[in-house]
Image (cartoon, rainbow, N blue to C red):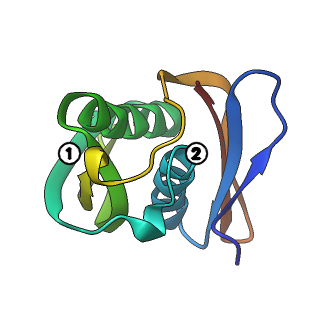
Amino acid sequence: MKKFRYLPHTADAKFRAFGSSLEEAFVNSALAMFNIICNTDSVKPEMKKIIRISAKKKESLLYDFLEELLFLLDTEGFLLNKTEKLKITEKDNEFSLGCTVYGDNYKKYKVKGNIKSITYNDMFIKEDNNEFMIQAVVDL
């Protein structure tokens, strides 16, 4: 199964990420976002960060997850290499996400362009026969 693909968009970057679980689709969404500005396969896992977030809706959880990664990029120069142990749980009408992300400082790599923000524009999460698809647009 392909992890993600990019779709045509007039000014921003639009992608679809896939997974056999919601967690895998979230992981592939993060890779799709960072692959816009660099090849994540070339990034070394030198830095480790823990992410924990909660939201009332899956789409809000996705937005907050990608936003947290973008915050790490903006404040610490963090480029993503991989995401491990991503777990999404639902309790009392709230979704929680926890994971460990690995990456390195962007100054060590060739980075093209800049991601300004995550958007809710055209965002969706679909499940069909235990296959998940996420669509998101990021402002460049």
Q: SS at mark 2? A: loop
* Mark sitting earlier along the chain (1/2): 2
Residue depicted at x 60% and y 73%:
20
Relative side of 78 to 47, left or right: right
Camera-nearest residue between 127 and 15: 15
User: Looking at the picture, which amino acid does disc 2 mark?
Assistant: Ile
| Residue 140 % position (x, y) | 58, 24
Q: How many marks?
A: 2
User: Looking at the picture, which amino acid does disc 1 mark?
Assistant: Arg
Camera-nearest residue between 45 and 135: 45
Can residue 90 be seen? no
Quadrant housing residue 130 = bottom right
Residue depicted at x 27% and y 59%:
103
| Residue 136 % position (x, y) | 64, 37
Dot 1 surroundings within 10 Å: few (below 14), some, or many (20 or more)? some
Q: Which residue in the structure is indicated by mark 2? A: 36
| Residue 132 % position (x, y) | 65, 61
